[in-house]
Amino acid sequence: MSLKDIANTDLLVKFTRAGTPSDPPGLVYTGDVGLGTQVVTIESTKCKAASKSICTETISITWPSPAMPCPFTSTTFTFISGAGFVLVSATKTKAEGKLVMRKGDKGSCVGSWQEIASPYRTAVCECDLEISDAGQTKVKAQ
């Protein structure tokens, strides 16, 4: 297994549409997402990389309402809600007994959308997720 950058709390997660038949048409990507109220991870309280807490175990993503939208926008559909996760791929390196998250760790997400105008159809989009930026480049792990 190769060495990869350990993810700290400055990480970014990239969302790539999986291209399912039920995807809402015309979705536009607005950019990778960092940690915040919708994107949550378990942080090491003692171990740091580039002066920021190291992320461990998993990243969970929840958008419970349109007020916290996913990183896609549409002119014909409104985002309703969604959820996803990124799983740890490290097999050896731990922080406080928990495996560390690294650049390139992957997961998936699903979201629901509703058409803005009649007939108000609903649509489901699926995304592949990946830690695109670990937040630092000096500390690496297997």
Image (tube, rainbow, N blue to C red):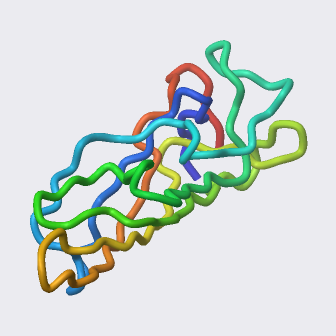
Q: Along the horizontal axis of the image, is 75 left or right of 54?
A: left
Q: Is residue 3 above or below residue 83?
A: above
Q: Considering depth in this image, is 136 or 59 the residue closer to the camera?
A: 59
Q: Is residue 11 above or below residue 119?
A: above
Q: Position of residue 131 (x, y in %)?
A: 46, 46
Q: Considering depth in this image, is 103 or 31 the residue closer to the camera?
A: 31
Q: Position of residue 52 (x, y in %)?
A: 66, 20
Q: Position of residue 43 (x, y in %)?
A: 75, 36
Residue at x 41% of width, y 41% of height: 33
Which quadrant does the C terminus fall into? Answer: top right
Q: Position of residue 57 (x, y in %)?
A: 73, 52
Task: State the count of labels.
Answer: 0
Q: Is residue 128 above or below residue 135?
A: below
Q: Residue furthest front?
A: 118
Q: Residue furthest right?
A: 97
Q: Considering depth in this image, is 75 or 92 the residue closer to the camera?
A: 75
Residue at x 47% of width, y 36% of height: 34
Residue at x 64% of width, y 55% of height: 88
| Res 23 → quadrant | bottom left
Q: Along the horizontal axis of the image, is 99 left or right of 23?
A: right
Residue at x 44% of width, y 65% of height: 81
| Res 53 → quadrant | top right
